[in-house]
Amino acid sequence: MGAEYLDSYRLLSPLGSGGFGAVHLALDGEGRTVAVKVLHPHVAADASALARLAREVETMRRVRGPHIAEVLDASLDGDQPYVVTRYVQGRALSAVAPLAGDDLVRLAHGLAEALVAVHRAGVVHRDLKPANVIIADGEPYVIDFGIAYALDSAAVTASGAVVGTPGYLAPEILEGRETGPAADVFAWAATMAFAATGRQPYGTGPVPAVAYRVVHGDPDLEGVPDWLAPLLRECLRAEPAARPSAERLLARLAGTSRPRVLTGAPAPMIVEHREAETREWRPGAQAPERRPTGEEARLRRREVVRRRWVVGTGLVVGLLAATGREHVPEVSLLLLVAYGTTVLVDAGFGLVAKSRSRVVVDLVCIAGSVALWAGLSTLFSTFTLLLAVGALLFAVGLLALAS
């Protein structure tokens, strides 16, 4: 079956579906991985909603931040309108909660920073919720910002799409009042409450029941840490003007401090709030070590994959070459030469990149494959080595089936 294309994007596999469209993992024209949201037909049929989204997309594309899955492209005038965003490989917060300790602190800071970036660009997310927060390498990334706001029209809503998620929508949205950045602050607090407890802050049940509790009830914050609960109550106030702005929220997180317990001490000991003496990170404290950026994390993962390939291929080549040394010596030597040449080229790239560890690993793997070839062919018979090759192929087959 041929690959499915949408303009220049090659659709690889579906990632999920929401009220406005289906999201696909895709490759762009340069081979980079992206996420393509193809709008549902009833949304695509609403000309006024598409016109509003088209106006908003240019603003949304200017939103940049370390915790934002940026909008990269959009096509809204074809048979299949779509929006393209950066693809973040991770798991939704809805699947990993509850969080605690540094993970919860990192989430609070990251989401607040994302809202500051979104609001400074003049965009309102309007659908911030655990499903729209991706956790990758311990860091949160906000997706789908601005789309719910841009597509909030009577025709789209009447077609069955829910503009937002009850339990995370602010009271002013549910009551049809004017909506602004304060609605995102409310959603931030509801999302953080879920992250800390694993429970919906306004409970579950029919949509009208949840909406009623949001407007008239109090959130369930039992189990939320003491450093976070007061801030959540302030952000979950019914009146938008009573909530802090995203910038004020971020400043409050950075300014929060409390006594801490030194980890690793023989007995709990309360110490003064002095950054040099504390090891446990809390709001207002400096992180013990800098977290890698998304690009740095991708480079590290790529290096791990490359190293595993070099080592694993060296082991396989050494085994195969040893198996054929007695009966097909030419093929045996050809395998070793091909592997050695390939890895030497890789070591050359390592020299150019000034990566000493890469060069060392490559040279050690070449020497190791030759030593493995010589040792195995000397110690074991061809029949025994053939059995080993068969076992290796069987194990690879099982791994392929399992994946």
Image (cartoon, rainbow, N blue to C red):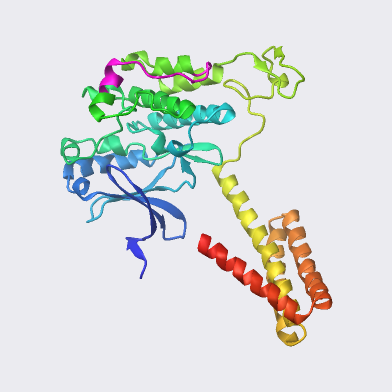
Nearest to the observer: residue 42 or residue 286: 42
**The image quarter in which residue 313 lies:** bottom right
> What residue is at 43 percent from the left and 19 percent from the top?
221
Pick whichever, 92 or 42, lies toward us.
92
Q: How many marks?
A: 0
Main SS type for the magenta part? loop
- Residue 293 percent coordinates (x, y): 57, 41
Residue bounds of the magenta highlight:
211-228
Residue depicted at x 69% and y 75% = 387
**Residue 283 x/y as whole percent:** 57, 21
Q: Quadrant of residue 203?
A: top left
Q: Quadrant of the N terminus?
A: bottom left
**Left or right of 141 on screen, residue 7:** left
Position in image of residue 258 (x %, y %) = 60, 14
Task: State whether residue 109 is above or below residue 54.
Answer: above
Where is residue 284? Give x, y as percent.
58, 20
Answer whether residue 121 is magenta in the image. Answer: no
In the shown orientation, is residue 250 left or right of residue 291? left
Is 132 displayed left or right of 207 in the figure?
right
Residue 40 visible within the image: yes
Q: Residue, x 60% and y 45% (percent of image)?
A: 296
Establish if 113 lies above or below 32.
above
Could you say which quadrant of the image residue 321 lies in?
bottom right
Using the image, determine if residue 62 lies above or below residue 6.
above
At x 59%, y 46%, the residue is: 297
Q: Is residue 333 visible?
A: no
